[in-house]
């Protein structure tokens, strides 16, 4: 498969909302600092060592997203939201990841929840929600097109069988007519 | 039943008239054969902008045309038993001509009904398969049924006019139509499509069939006339109108992309598009399907292309080996030269970089030279254009520090003969001691069946393990193999890159779990020249990825 740059994923993430001293060995701030140094394995280790479940989820998502592991990052985000369904940062990042991975339905749902939680962001989120809906519309159009294609193939196959049945009837006997 | 025409009283004249009539009928059969092949071969090109030209699409088109021809033979056999077969022959040819004239104009709406604009490669697997089958039925079956009628009707006419045995008449018609098919086959691939384009090829085929149909009607002479005359007129006018006003409209590029040039090659439809502004300006070489992928990419400055581009990862061996004098690279699947530009941009000053490349499609290279700064051959660059990668290597004794394997057919297919253990063994022989093979593999991670099959097969050929890296922000993996050595992975000595911060910067994200790993022989399906189910694996790969994403998004939501 030729390049398929998920360009949407290429952006600078805003640092997670919770702050912590950079010199910490584990935790969100340490993870952010190590990502800055290009030490992603160490960053992930630091993230996973955070004692706060919310900070841990945020940090882990941040590291994985920065490392381009989009599916893994979304998985962490959704797991984090299971415990903290109203965390705006997790909602925002998970929605963006879903959008990057082409899951418009999930992105729209998560953006909708974020919008309800932070009404001030409605205007800023509008283009992202529009993009998410467009993706979802496209997915539905593809599903309809697939159904259409399968119907056409079925009808064509039945028509072919009917034509065969017609054509294979016994020919009339007797002398051939002149040309 | 209409009475038989009075035969000429002079036997010599009668024989001459029979011969002329028979020759005309055989010419008609030959023209119909040629027209059939023009439709069959150009049909794939008509569908290519929406569905590509993969083996599945070819199979669908050929299958539909064969089924329609079979039905046409059956229908023709019934019509042959009715009065006035020459008139039926003329009508069948005119119907075929009219339908074929409409194809270029009908292609876009029909194809888009089965494959909506946009979409992504990973979602499109089912649509490409079913959509191309449905579109082939809708577009090509009616004309092929009509063309199928020609054979039995022509046999009947020849048999009646010459009063020879049915087998003799049938053999003569088959001989003529097969010769016509032969001419249509070579003419379509080598002359019509490249020189005239898809639409004009169909119009020419339509005009030829219409002329043959009118010829058959003229031969029918006094055979009964009736409402068919009006039908003929409508069909001819309808076909002419479609030819005059309809045009072949491939899908438009995505919003924000400007088409710089379009071209049609014997292999695919290509276009160069440009997007972005200033430093973010880029150009892409796009082919066929028009999904969210492209064959090559260009940025104004050579060097790393940035996150999501697998080409950057071809440069890692340059950092790991840190050569001081020279580095000889052969890129198999040169495309528009993206790999060359990346390597040129990151090679340390003073390093003598020699870049060779093989590209099957000459039009891709021509476009790249005009729009994407692909250099012409000189002391440091050499390209084999219009040739197959394996064939070029088979006749070459050159050895390289690095081979880059980036050969893709139809956007998403690794050609079967370029992914086998025999080919990987040949590649190994073209590497200098310690030399690198780097393979771009479209796949969704280290568990992907295509990635495991190709990397595992290559590992067996090299007698070691392959290092596989999942390219961040993309759905590509790059496999690395070394002659007489094993590539180092994260944490191993030899992994770090010193003295080239740009390349060293690529390594960090690869240290995340699941982003890299070593695969040995037996990691996946064993691919050989004799048995290579790579297409099946590619479909599996896409289906698996789609299912995983659906599970992730559709699971219990928080």
Image (cartoon, coloured by chain):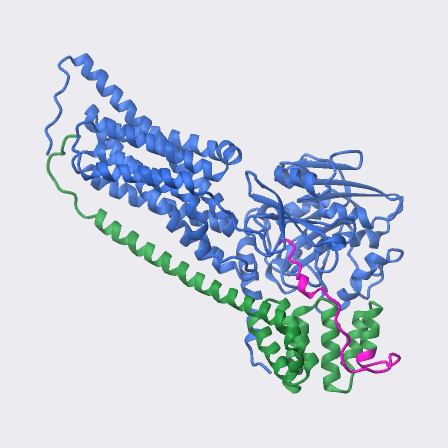
Left or right: residue B419 versus residue B210 is right
Residue A103 visible in the shown view: no
| Residue A87 or residue A37, whichever sits in front | A87
Q: Answer with left or right where residue B521 lies relative to residue B155.
A: right
Q: Nearer the viewer, residue B182 or B501?
A: B501
Query: How many circles with numbers are drawn on the protein?
Result: 0
Residue A28 is covered by the magenta coloring: yes
Query: Residue at 56% of width from left, 66% of height from top?
Result: A135
Instruction: From the viewer's perspective, tell me whether residue B371 is left or right of residue B13.
Output: right
Q: Please, what is the dominant secondary structure of the magenta stretch?
A: loop
Who's green, chain-wise? A
B171 shown above or below B282: above
Question: Where's residue A88, x and y in %?
Answer: 68, 81
What shade has chain B been given? blue
Q: Can residue B84 be found in the magenta stretch?
A: no
- On the image, the x and y values in percent for residue A60 come to 73, 77
Left or right, B68 with reference to B462: left
Range covered by the magenta-colored residues: A1-29
Between B67 and B524, the residue placed more toward the observer is B67
**Residue A8, x across and y down, in percent:** 67, 64
Residue B115 in the image, given as x and y percentages of width and height: 48, 57
- Which residue shows up at 79% across the image and 71% down it? A41
In the displayed structure, A117 sits above or below B128; it is below
**On-image quarter of the N terminus of chain B:** top left
Q: Is residue B62 above or below residue A140?
A: above
Q: Quadrant of the C terminus of chain B?
A: bottom right
Say if residue B299 shows up in the picture: yes
């Amino acid at each position: 498969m030729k390049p398929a740059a998920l360009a949407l994923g290429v952006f600078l993430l805003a640092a997670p909302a919770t702050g912590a001293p950079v010199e910490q060995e584990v935790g969100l701030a340490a993870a952010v600092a190590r990502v800055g140094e290009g030490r992603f394995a160490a960053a992930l280790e630091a993230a996973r060592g955070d004692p706060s479940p919310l900070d841990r989820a945020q940090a882990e998502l941040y590291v994985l997203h920065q490392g381009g592991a989009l599916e893994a990052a979304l998985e962490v985000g959704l797991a984090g939201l299971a415990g903290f369904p109203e965390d705006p940062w997790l909602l925002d990042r998970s929605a963006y990841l879903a959008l990057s991975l082409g899951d418009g339905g999930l992105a729209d749902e998560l953006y909708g929840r974020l919008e309800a939680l932070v009404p001030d962001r409605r205007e800023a989120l509008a283009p992202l929600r529009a993009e998410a809906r467009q993706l979802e519309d496209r997915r539905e159009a593809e599903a309809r097109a697939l159904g259409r294609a399968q119907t056409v193939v079925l009808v064509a196959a039945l028509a072919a069988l009917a034509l065969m049945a017609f054509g294979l009837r016994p020919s009339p006997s007797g002398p051939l007519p002149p040309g | 039943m209409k009475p038989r025409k009075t035969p000429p009283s002079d036997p010599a004249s009668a024989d001459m008239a029979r011969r002329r009539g028979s020759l005309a009928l055989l010419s008609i059969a030959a023209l119909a054969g040629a027209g059939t092949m023009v439709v069959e071969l150009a049909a794939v090109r008509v569908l290519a902008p929406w569905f590509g030209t993969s083996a599945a699409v070819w199979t669908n088109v050929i299958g539909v045309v064969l089924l329609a021809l079979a039905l046409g033979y059956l229908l023709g056999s019934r019509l042959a038993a009715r009065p006035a077969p020459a008139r039926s022959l003329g009508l069948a040819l005119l119907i075929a001509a009219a339908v074929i004239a409409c194809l270029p104009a009908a292609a876009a709406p029909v194809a888009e009904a089965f494959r909506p604009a946009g979409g992504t490669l990973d979602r499109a697997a089912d649509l490409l398969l079913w959509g191309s089958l449905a579109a082939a039925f809708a577009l090509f079956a009616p004309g092929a049924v009509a063309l199928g009628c020609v054979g039995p009707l022509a046999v009947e006419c020849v048999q009646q006019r010459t009063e020879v045995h049915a087998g003799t008449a049938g053999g003569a018609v088959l001989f003529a139509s097969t010769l016509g098919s032969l001419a249509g086959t070579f003419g379509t691939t080598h002359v019509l499509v490249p020189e005239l384009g898809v639409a004009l090829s169909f119009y020419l085929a339509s005009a030829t069939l219409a002329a043959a149909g009118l010829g058959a009607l003229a031969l029918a002479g006094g055979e009964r006339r009736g409402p068919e005359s009006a039908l003929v007129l409508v069909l001819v006018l309808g076909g002419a109108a479609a030819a005059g006003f309809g045009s072949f409209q491939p899908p438009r590029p995505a919003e924000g992309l400007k088409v710089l040039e379009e071209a049609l090659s014997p292999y695919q439809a290509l276009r160069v598009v440009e997007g972005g502004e200033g430093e973010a300006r880029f150009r892409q070489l796009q082919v066929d399907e028009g999904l969210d992928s492209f064959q090559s990419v260009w940025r104004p400055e050579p060097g790393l292309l940035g996150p999501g581009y697998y080409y950057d990862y071809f440069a890692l061996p340059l950092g790991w080996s840190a050569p001081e004098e020279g580095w000889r690279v052969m890129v198999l699947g040169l495309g528009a030269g993206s790999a060359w530009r990346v390597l040129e941009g990151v090679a340390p000053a003073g390093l003598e970089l020699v870049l060779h490349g093989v590209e099957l499609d000459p039009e891709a290279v021509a476009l790249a030279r005009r729009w994407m700064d692909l250099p012409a051959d000189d002391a440091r660059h050499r390209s084999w254009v219009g040739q197959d990668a394996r064939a070029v290597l088979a006749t070459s004794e050159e050895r390289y520090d690095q081979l880059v394997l980036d050969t893709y057919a139809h956007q998403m297919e690794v050609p079967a003969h370029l992914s086998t253990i025999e080919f990987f063994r040949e590649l190994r022989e073209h590497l200098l001691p310690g030399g690198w093979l780097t393979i771009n593999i479209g796949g969704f991670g280290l568990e992907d069946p295509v990635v495991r099959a190709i990397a595992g097969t290559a590992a067996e050929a090299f007698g070691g393990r392959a290092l596989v890296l999942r390219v961040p922000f993309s759905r590509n993996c790059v496999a690395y193999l070394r002659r007489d050595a094993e590539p180092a992975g994260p944490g191993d000595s030899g992994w770090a890159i010193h003295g080239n911060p740009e390349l060293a910067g690529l390594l960090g994200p690869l240290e995340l779990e699941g982003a890299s790993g070593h695969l040995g022989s037996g990691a996946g399906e064993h691919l050989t020249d004799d048995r290579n189910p790579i297409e099946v694996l590619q479909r599996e790969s896409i289906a698996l990825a789609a299912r995983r994403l659906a599970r992730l998004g559709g699971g219990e939501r928080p």
